[in-house]
Image (cartoon, helix red, strand yellow):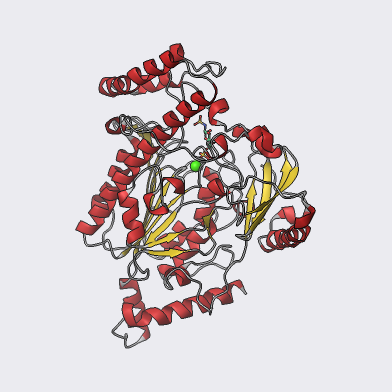
Amino acid sequence: MNHLKKALGSVAVGTALAGSLFSCKPANKAEASLTKKKNRPNVLFIMTDDHAYQAIGAYGSKINKTPNLDRLANEGMRFDKAYVTNSICGPSRAVVLTGKYSHMNGKLDNRIPFDGSQQTFPKLFQKAGYQTAIVGKWHLYSEPTGFDYWNILPGQGEYYNPDFIEMGERKRLTGYCTDLTTDIALEWLDKKRDSGKPFMMMLHHKAPHRSWQPAERHLNLYDDQKIPEPETLFEDYKKRGGASAISEMSIVDHMRDGHDLKLEKKHASSSGNKWHDNSLERLRKRMNEAQRKAWENAYGPKNEAYAKANLKGEALLKWKYQRYIKDYLRCIASVDENIGRVLEYLEKKGQLDNTLIIYTSDQGFYLGEHGWFDKRFMYEESFRTPLLIRYPKLVKPGSVSKEMCMNLDFAPTMLDIAGLDIPWDVQGESMKPLLANAGVVPDSVEWRNSMYYHYYEFPGSHNVSRHYGVSDGKFKLIRFYKGAVSWELYDLENDPKEMKNLYNDPAYAKHISRLKKELKRLQIKYKDPASVGVPAKG
Ligand code: SGN
Ligand code: CA
């Protein structure tokens, strides 16, 4: 059924494109396959780490500008309902590579190493004659497989003078991670690849991951501005009860003074946080003299002013939010500039319009909503992820899709657009029909009406209870089954900020029973052992 659906989708798109893409009809089969080969697009998959859609101009950001990402949206398609299956780094990367849920690819949480012997989409591109590469964050612990070239950050990587592992060889580079990652990618594109073949490159930035260390040139960006606060910044998450109450991702309570807020020991926050890290000390050791000076000049006077102000209560939270969000946005400024460099390069080489460019993040992030940072929960800010796709041969510039898409769909979409077969066991759907039809599902194609989510890393950092759930875009039902065991139901249309759990309201009993059935249906469809009550072990 699934694959009949895909076939139908491809037929519809193929017909729509026949006139525009392949205007001179090839005479015979061999010639047709040659034409197909010649027309194979390059693929550039760009992924950042923890980049919230709330911090992208094209998504209506109230807090920053991202001209280069906006260019991708203006010249391509923006997806307003792009979601992840498991909102955390390593697992999300494994879903992208395999097009399969975590329980199928084995990467349930950040701690389990990825099994690189399994089928991945880079391997399929490589087999089909593409040159394949991955540069930047990897975070899967096993060595990359399926790549002709790889140059990755060990683990989470560092912002300043990071180590990179190039095809097994570890080297420390001088400079800022986002710039260096781009330098490496451009060098491979320009000098190191076989330019007789199309390329598939995964360009993965560490930024804007915690602890949000900006580049020297951005250390004073936003200094004279107050970044708008989200409406729910002052929500007392403890009052929500359940999984929220036991989580540890509050800006005021759980950010670390040195590591996150860049305060020196002598400036330690008045919130009662104990001084318990040596992150700044380690960072200084890593930096060179010029970097240390720039850092001191930027944070020194601001920290002195903070110490004098002796802030408490709401004022302290406001200060911490500003420190956090400004550093986070400064890291995004470097991402945006570097994406501009890549677009410029491809344009100069005449490859821009022949390259399928995907921009996304490994998940969304809380930018102070509910008083939080981090991700993991199935609530919208972290369940959703930004998704921009530019490929003018298929996509109408400036179009917007409101269809439910998932990171599960990225692999089949790339394979489909490159004209490669989608293996039967891939669980995602090709988004090509949507891309070719201004973001809307064509009549000939069936599309999902609901999405399944499953998060596993509990116990773990930030103490987010294990949960699975289903969303149909109107309602969301979540089952927290380990940690703070409970059910939650949200009415997404009337309560988009998910402030009121309706699970115990008898007026919603019908919705609950419908969604429970749908949850079960999806668990069976995706072969999640949770469907028989035994979720996989992390
Ligand atoms: C680190 C961070 C956490 C974060 C995880 C996972 N702490 O442990 O805040 O949730 O990574 O992030 S830190 O103090 O070490 O920065 S993920 O994006 O890699 O999944
Ligand atoms: Ca992440």
Figure check: 468 above or below 313 = below
Q: In the figure, is residue 225 to the left or right of 469?
A: left
Residue 283 percent across, percent down from the top left: 39, 23
Instruction: Look at the image and tell me whether residue 114 can be seen.
Output: no
Along the viewing direction, whichever of 511 and 413 lies nearer the viewer: 511
**Residue 220, quarter of the rendered image:** top left
Along the viewing direction, whichever of 368 and 157 lies nearer the viewer: 368
Residue 5 percent across, percent down from the top left: 57, 75
- What residue do we see at 40% from left, 68% from top? 418
Number of numbered discs: 0
Residue 28 percent across, percent down from the top left: 35, 87
**In the image, farthest residue toward the left:** 348
**Residue 128, quarter of the rendered image:** bottom left
Where, quadrant-wise, is the N terminus in this rendering? bottom right
- What residue do we see at 47% from left, 31% from top? 321
Figure check: 200 above or below 39 = above
Q: In the figure, is residue 489 to the left or right of 235?
A: right
Instruction: Look at the image and tell me whether residue 10 can be seen.
Output: yes
- What residue do we see at 62% from left, 33% from top? 236
**In the image, farthest residue toward the bottom:** 27
Residue 22 percent across, percent down from the top left: 32, 80
Along the viewing direction, whichever of 271 and 481 lies nearer the viewer: 271
Where, quadrant-wise, is the C terminus in this rendering? top right
- What residue do we see at 43% from left, 16% from top? 309
Q: In the figure, is residue 176 to the left or right of 99?
A: left
